[in-house]
Image (cartoon, helix red, strand yellow):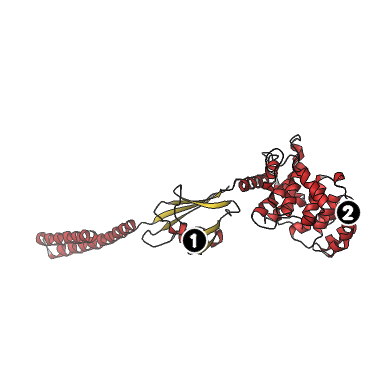
Amino acid sequence: MKKLFSFGLMGWLLVSLVACGQNASSPESLDLKVEALEAQIETLKEDNEALESKLSAYESQEGLVTFVIDGDQPMVRSLSFEPNEPLKPMTLLLNAFGESEVAYSESEYGVFIESIGPIQPSYGSYIMIEKNNVPLSVGFSDALVDDGDVFRFSLVYWDVQAASVRESLDLFLASEIHAFTDEYNYDVLHALALLNETPNLSYVAANEGESGTLKDLLVLKALGEDTTHAASDYANAFQTDVLFRASLGMMALSETTHYETLEASYLRRLGNANPSTLSFDDLAMTVMHLKDETPANLMNAMRERMVNLDNAPSLAFAIMALIALDENPFDSMHESGVSLPDMLMRLQTLEGGFLYDFASGPDSTRQFSSPQSFLALSALEAYLNGRPAVPYE
C-alpha cells in the first residue's frame, strides 16, 4: 500500500510535467517548471519516507507488562517488550527488577521464586503470583505474557499460628523497636539476632558489678562483637544467689573457659535449690540453660506452674524453655484453653508493646514485658523455621 502510494504520487507528477510541456510558451519557462516539479518530487519523497517510518513503527508497537511486589511500600516496575520475540516471564521479571531483587532456582518442574524484593517466605507462608488479579494456574515460567498484563507477587500464610507470630513481631518492629535498641536492651538485641536483623550498632563496655558486667557481655554477644574482656569482667563478678541470673550468666559464658571455672559453684546452687522457693522465671531460665539435663524436681515444678501463668515475662520464658527442650510451644496449653504463645500475644497492645498482665496499665509495657515477649516470639519464629532459636548462648 505504501509503495503504491509512492508510485501514484510520482506518476501524477510526471503527468503534470507532460502537461506543462504541452502548455509551455518557451523553453526557458519549461525548464524552470521542470526544476520546480523535480524539487517537489524530492520533498514529497522525503515526506513519504517519513510517513512509511511512522507507519512501520506503529505496526510493530511494543507491548507493556507490569510487575508489582506487595508490601508496606509496594515495588512497581513496567517494562516494554516486543510481542513477537520469544521472551520468558522470568526474563522480563529479571530485566524489570534485576538479579539482586529476585532469588530463584530452576528444576525439571520449572522456575521456583524463593524471594522477591522484601518478600521472603518463612515457615507457613508462600509467594502467591497473580496475573491480572487472578492467581496463576500454571507455573510462572509457563505463564503467557500479553500487552497490558499485570503480575502481582504477595506473601500469603497458610499456617494461622505462624501468621499470628509474624504479625505480632511486625507490630513491635514498626512501633517499639528503636526505643529499646537506643538503650541497648539485650533482650531486644538478642531477638534481632535470632531474626537475622542485627542492627549496626557499636557498644563500649563500661559497667561495673554483677548486673552491669552481665549486661555488657550480653549486649556484645548479641551484636557479634568481641566478648573476651567482658566475659572476664563478668566471671569475676559472677554470683549464684539469684538462680535466674546465675543461669542467664552461665548461658552468656557458654563456650568460654570461664564456664568450666564457675560450673561447680553453679551446680552446688542447683543442688541446694528448693523448687517451692523459686520463682517461675528462675525455673524457666534454668531449663533454658540446662535443657534435658535439668534436675527432675526443677523441671517438674516448671511444667506444673506453666499452665496458669498470668504475666507476659513468665509466659515468654515458658515459651523459650520449651523451645530449648525442642518442644513446639503451640502444643502446650494454658488453663484458659489457648496455647501459651496465643496467651502471650493477647497481652500485646495496638501500639505494639506487651502489658505485664491483664490488670496492668500501658506503662507496664515499658518494663520487662515488651522486650522479653518480643524475644520469646522471635525465638518461636526461628524455631518454626528450623534456625537456632535459644538466645543468650
Identify the residue position indicated by label 1 in the image.
Answer: 111
Q: Residue at 78% x, 58% y: name it.
A: 220
Q: Is residue 41 toward the left or the right of residue 283 in the image?
A: left
Image quadrant holding the N terminus, namely: bottom left
Query: Which callout, 1 or 2, points to the residue nearer the camera?
Result: 2
Residue 18 location, x and y as percent? 12, 62
Q: Residue at 71% x, 52% y: name it.
A: 323
Q: Residue furthest left?
A: 22
Q: Nearer the viewer, residue 354 or 182?
A: 354
Q: Nearer the viewer, residue 86 or 327?
A: 327
Q: Is residue 128 toward the left or the right of residue 264 in the image?
A: left
Identify the residue position indicated by label 2 in the image.
Answer: 271
- Under mark 2, the amino acid is Gly
Is residue 202 among what the camera can see? Answer: no
Q: Earlier in the sequence, mark 1 or mark 2?
A: 1
Mark number, residue 282: none
- Secondary structure beneath disc 1? strand
Q: Is residue 186 toward the left or the right of residue 36 in the image?
A: right
Q: Is residue 305 toward the left or the right of residue 145 in the image?
A: right
For label 1, the crowd category at 10 Å Cα-Cα, with few meaning under 14, some 14 to 19 and many 20 or more, is some
